[in-house]
Amino acid sequence: MTIDKRKLLVAVVVVVIAAIVAIQLNLEPKYEKIVHAGKQIGDNKSGDMMAELPGQFIVASFTGFKQVIAGALWVRADEFFHRGHYHAIVPLVRMVTWLDPHNIDVYTTGAWHLDYNFVDYANTLSDKRYIPASIAFMKEGIRNNPNIWDLYFELGWTHYARKLMDNEMAAYYISEACKYDSVDVNTGAKQRRPEFVDRMKAHMLEKVGKLDEANEQWFAAHKRASKALEDYKKNPKAADWIDQSTIDLCNRNQSLLLLRRGWRYGDMKSYEQGLEIAERVKSPADWVQATSSARKDFESRKGKHWEGDAAKPVDAKFNASWLRAAPRVLVIKGTVNIIQASEYKGLASESFTRWYAENESAKADSKVKWRDGSRVYWRLQDADYVMPDVNKFDWTTNLENTVAWGDIYVGGGSFLTKLDMSDPRDLGMYPLKAEKYKLTIWMEPTDPGMPDFVQDRVGWRGEALMDKECIDTKTRPGYRLLKKEFILSRSDII
Amino acid sequence: MIIWAIARTTVGDALRKKILQVFLVVAIGLIVLSLSFSQTLSFSSQRGASSDFMLLKSFGLGMMALAGIFISLILGVTLIPQEFERRTIYTILAKPVKRYEFITGKFLGALMTLGIATGLMGATFIITIVLKAIGAQQAAASPTLGHVLGASAEKIALFDWNMVWAVILVYLQFMVLSSIVLLFSLIFTQTVNFFMGAAVYAVGFMSTVVISLGGAEGASSALRFFYKTVSYLLPRFDQFNIPNQLLHPETQVTNMGAYTGMMALYGLLYTLLALVVAILIFERKEV
């Protein structure tokens, strides 16, 4: 080949490279558009997986490279997440766990995604119909990974407590989590369960009013943390880091449980035990001061008959109603006597919190008549809707059903919210195809969103709650709830 | 004429290779077999028959691509070195055959072989889908199964031109891959070349993953630059997959023909690039 021809060929190479780059730059946006066009039509099809999943992935899944493919798909799912293509993630997640059933992150993230990310267009409510699938997915993860704490905890906290507001089940699964340690994914070595798991178990048991069990758990958490601190001091390199603050945290929380038991039910033994533990904690200063104030209150009540702060009834005067503001728009409103500032006057818990005293001494413009922040919950569903059995995983969520719920902030003794199902883009989330609907509006002291000061006044199980019409003791035996139910016809909403 | 003669001989040689025949037969067999297992692998009962179709098409295209890639790799890896091993290259180059004619003829032969293989697999694929569509339509019309399959089965067309586009795009990626492997065969040994070719395909096919890794949180700028460069330097095999219209009949993407044309141009340019570089190398190679 002559030098001239060689030069010519090199020039051709340069031109071709330039042309390739130019075409690639032109192609990229087109390809993006094509790949994602399937999702832009915006329905909820699990079948999108196939559109996103080139056949080579499917074929390669049958080879020995399962984990590699799973990893690559997971990277792809993450990319979709950042782009907001949420529906495309679900089948990918399913595929990844099918290929690699020990990928914990995929279970936790996938289930969280199902529970939290399918929201209406106003971004106010998530689609609750996916919760059974999410929980079943977590249970599948637990079946595949039964000997580590992670998924039990995640199921209990993220799904049962935060999403379903079912603290009983949350307490159960977090208790299960406390039976296991974990495994270091890099080395395969046993990895100590973090302290917060054990503390959360105690909190959940307390929240549902299982006070003895909660107290026992605080002892167990304290003992475990003390042993860990001892190990760490002996050999800082081999043990996980821990310091005195973890022990103090256990002490503070356990003392609060016992103090509250004393205040709310007049249990002087618990009150005294709570003070003894509280006095072990020497900082911060306001804690020490509050403890000292509570000690004085305890001494003043010693030997006297006293039934506790929750023994004095509170007439809730619960009133809830709804109205149709526009087609597919409901307004839920009402009043509840939870809780007037004056209700805190003279309570034993006041010795510690000093909320009433500080409110009384505040300037007129910042003084409040109500202690705001409690929550009322509402739930609208097809009248015959029963949440599907979540023990067996199934992607076939029935999208014909309508079920939605949420909470409403209570301020000044009243509450109001608008449930807007009218956006045409939300028709899939609120199909409203049934003839009858059940609207339930209720208040429950054990709900996770309920502030502690509500239970300070009405007790863990709502013992002090009174109401002429709306007390409900059947929904959760042993607990007192405020509840009102309405049956709506389709035409009431549409 | 010389190029054409070399190409024809190459096709004859290639088609006699047992290993290529086995790949072809297995791929065709699996595509046909996929008719039976599409039902059991369906992930979405909500979509009914259309979901099965997506799986069937995806599997068929995937199978075709995998078999074709192996054929491209094996063919490309042995194309030139085999001539050295048999010492036939000395006889050929002793005749009035220019080196670029030899390389071009060999490559053209490989393309023709791949064309025959893709044609056979593509025809099987299309016939399989058409048979499935006929079955779905008959089932939808049946009074007992119709309500189970729902309306989706009725909407399925017997023949979808997008299948032809898909087969063409699958063929184009074989063309690019075989040109790269042919180029590598002048530099590396056969084993190294096989794995290098496979790696180029794998990384090129997962370009979106490579780009995602480059954009990952915490990635250093050097790492980002590396991944970005890799994603631009290697052919984007993922772009030869058209997962939308074929697998998603309800999606309307305009100018699919233009896209396919652009991909064809892209593939041809890559092929030309590899071929010119191969010629430049072969011209200086001592034979």
Image (spheres, grey):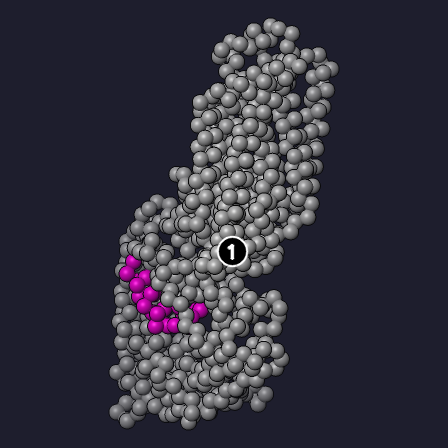
- What is the magenta range? A160-181
Q: Is residue A167 magenta?
A: yes
Q: Is residue A408 magenta?
A: no
Residue in front for this viewpoint, A363 or A262: A262
Q: Is label 1 in a helix, a strand or a loop?
A: helix
Q: Chain of mark 1?
A: B
**x%, y% of residue A119?**
54, 65
How many residues crowd around disc 1 within 10 Å: few (fewer than 14), some, or many (20 or more)?
Answer: some
Height in image: B170 above or below A248?
above
For image coordinates 54% across by 70% down, the residue present is A431
Height in image: B33 above or below B2?
below
Height in image: B193 above or below A207?
above
In the image, is A354 to the left or to the right of A195?
Answer: right
Residue type at mark 1 is Ala
Asked if one can make out residue B87 in the rendered structure from this viewpoint, the answer is yes
Asked if one can make out residue A341 in the rendered structure from this viewpoint, the answer is no
For image coordinates 58% across by 9% down, the residue present is B92
For image coordinates 29% across by 58% down, the residue present is A180
Image quarter in which the N terminus of chain A is found: top right
In the image, is A302 to the left or to the right of B157?
Answer: left
**x%, y% of residue A64?**
39, 38
Residue in front for this viewpoint, A301 or B219: B219
In the image, is A156 to the left or to the right of A332?
Answer: left
**x%, y% of residue B49?**
50, 53
Name the residue beneath numbered marker 1: B141
Q: How many marks?
A: 1
